[in-house]
């Protein structure tokens, strides 16, 4: 008897899940505000937020560019400093013993508490916001770089050394490739923290940016504009995060971290 022809299973596209969940959430939000007769001063409906975005689109776009410049520069500075410093701390025991405890102590300090000091030292311009974003985003890159460089298989390291490999060859062919998954994990965490750092700086002192616009809207009791700024920040953060994730998938095609969540079993 011939085997029955197996029909291919229908798979729902991965993108459909967040889209459906978001639509359901927004529909429930709209219904609660409308039928609950909630004041827009307390909680505007999604349609009111959308109307505010449309009305203030050019303003939100200009402020978004300012905030994006701040967290992108802060993130870039965190990468430029965090990656080499993580390598130096791993390879140098005196540096590790001298500076790593100090870096951990610095990380435990709430950055909003020192943001006013940074503003006083550097000023209210772009540089201070970049420094605050760097201060918040720096530590995950440093720690994950250190963890990654220590994650190489000892057997592989011993094999290369037995074949006469130099320390530089050991780094480029063994340790650095093994560290890339952890490094990208740190970059993705730091990308979200850099956005937070830029907004913290704008909350303390600024004359432009989405954080500044939130303060102005709050003073005017314009709750819809506040939510519109939150939407803009969310979009910026998601675009930045997924840009790094796309880069990770291009660089780490061989690693499990490059597979989408829906492909895991």
Image: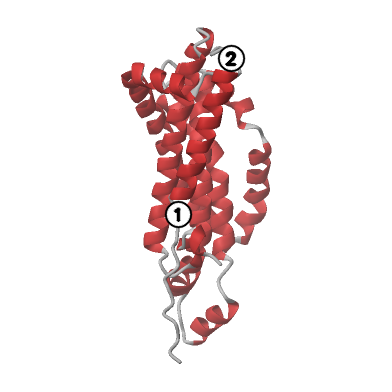
Number of numbered discs overlaid on the protein picture: 2
Q: Earlier in the sequence, mark 2 or mark 1?
A: 1
| 157, above or below 70, in the image | below
Q: Which mark is residue 37?
A: 2
Residue 133 horizontal/vertical position (percent): 50, 34
Residue at the spot x=46%, y=63% of the render?
Answer: 259
Residue 67 horizontal/vertical position (percent): 41, 28
Residue 82 horizontal/vertical position (percent): 50, 49
Identify the element where label 1 is drawn: loop
Left or right of residue 15, residue 154 in this image: right
Left or right of residue 232, residue 203 in this image: right
Which is closer to the viewer, label 2 or label 1? Answer: 2
Q: Residues within 10 Å of mark 2 (few under 14, many from 20)?
A: few
Left or right of residue 188, residue 95 in this image: right
For residue 105, which quarter of the picture? top right
Residue at the spot x=38%, y=27% of the render?
Answer: 64
Image quarter hosting the C terminus = bottom right
Residue at the spot x=47%, y=68% of the render?
Answer: 255
| 23, above or below 129, in the image | below
Asked whether residue 132 appears in the rendered view, the answer is no
Along the viewing direction, whichever of 25 and 163 lies nearer the viewer: 25
- Residues at marks 2 and 1 touching, judged by CB atoms closer than 8 Å: no
Along the viewing direction, whichever of 130 and 94 lies nearer the viewer: 130
For residue 146, which quarter of the picture? bottom right
Identify the element where label 2 is drawn: loop
Residue at the spot x=34%, y=21% of the render?
Answer: 57
Residue that lies at the very extreme toward the front in this rendered image: 1
Asked whether residue 243 appears in the rendered view, the answer is yes
Residue 264 horizontal/vertical position (percent): 53, 65
Distance in Å between CA atoms under marks 2 and 1:
36 Å
Q: Which mark is residue 14?
A: 1
Coloured how?
secondary structure
């Amino acid at each position: 008897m011939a085997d029955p022809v197996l029909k291919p299973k229908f798979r729902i596209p991965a993108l459909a899940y967040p889209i459906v969940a978001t639509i359901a959430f927004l529909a429930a939000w709209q219904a609660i505000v409308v039928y609950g007769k909630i004041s827009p001063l307390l909680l505007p409906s999604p349609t009111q937020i959308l109307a505010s975005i449309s009305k203030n689109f050019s303003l939100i776009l200009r402020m978004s560019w300012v905030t994006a410049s701040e967290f992108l520069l802060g993130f870039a500075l965190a990468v430029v400093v965090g990656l080499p410093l993580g390598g130096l701390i791993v390879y140098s025991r005196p540096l590790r013993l001298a500076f790593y405890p100090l870096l951990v102590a610095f990380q435990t300090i709430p950055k909003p508490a020192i943001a006013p000091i940074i503003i006083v030292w550097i000023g209210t311009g772009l540089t201070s916001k970049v420094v605050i974003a760097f201060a918040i985003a720096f530590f995950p890159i440093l720690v994950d770089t250190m963890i990654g460089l220590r994650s190489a298989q000892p057997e592989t390291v011993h094999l290369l050394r037995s074949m006469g490999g130099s320390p530089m060859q050991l780094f480029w062919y063994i340790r650095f490739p093994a560290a890339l998954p952890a490094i990208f994990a740190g970059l993705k965490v730091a990308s979200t923290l850099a956005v937070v750092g830029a907004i913290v700086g704008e909350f303390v002192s600024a004359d432009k940016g989405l954080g500044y616009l939130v303060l102005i809207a709050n003073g005017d009791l314009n709750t819809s504009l506040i939510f519109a700024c939150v939407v803009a920040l969310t979009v910026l953060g998601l675009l930045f995060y997924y840009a790094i994730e796309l880069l990770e998938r291009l660089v780490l095609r061989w690693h499990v971290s490059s597979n989408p969540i829906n492909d895991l079993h």
